[in-house]
Amino acid sequence: MTAANECRYTPGTERRTSPRFPIEQPVSYRILDAQPGQSTYKGVTLDMSSAGVLFTTDQQLERGKRLELCVYWPVALDSGCPLKLVAVGRVVRAEDGRAAMRIEKYEFRTRGSSRLPEEVAAAIGQGARSAGTEIRR
């Protein structure tokens, strides 16, 4: 085997450049490559970094699909205005009701209401249960 063909990393070592943080927040997403009028789907973030998001899904996503992902941000602006993180990226991994998306661009937007809609609060509970985690409030 030549040096050019050798594996440059040891299996099991962390290759991410950005640390991930365990954050469980409601998420909605839509597939940008889909037909116009495509539905919006719901899930829960499992962990996040500045480069990507791991979240639960209610459908099987294909690797390479472009998504717009909205995360209900847990911290409000100084005036108490709730925020959401809107990120666009590509699915890099999808398995067992979960998907990982690499973030290509993102921005924070105001959310409009300080209270979570009931279906979003329910999605947090459902997503955490399906991921095998408990919700800490």
Image (cartoon, grey):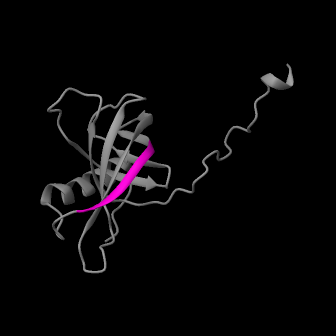
Q: Residue 24: x percent and y percent?
A: 36, 59
Q: Magenta stretch: dominant SS?
A: strand
Q: Quadrant of the C terminus?
A: bottom left
Of 121 and 31, the residue lying toward us: 31
Quadrant position of residue 18:
bottom right
Of 22 and 52, the residue lying toward us: 52
Report the residue at 43% width, 41% height from top. Answer: 100
46 to 6, vertically: above or below:
below
Quick check: 56 left or right of 12? left
Report the residue at 57% width, 57% height from top. Answer: 19
Of 33 and 61, the residue lying toward us: 33
Asked if residue 37 is among those painted magenta in the image, a careful observer would answer no
Report the residue at 81% width, 24% height from top. Answer: 4
Quick check: 1 left or right of 57? right
- Specify the segment rendered in magenta: 102-110
Q: Residue 98: x percent and y percent?
A: 38, 41
68 to 18, vertically: above or below:
above
Asked if residue 108 is among those painted magenta in the image, a careful observer would answer yes
Report the residue at 86% width, 20% height from top. Answer: 2
Instruction: Residue lying at the far right in this picture: please name it.
Output: 2
Q: Quadrant of the N terminus?
A: top right
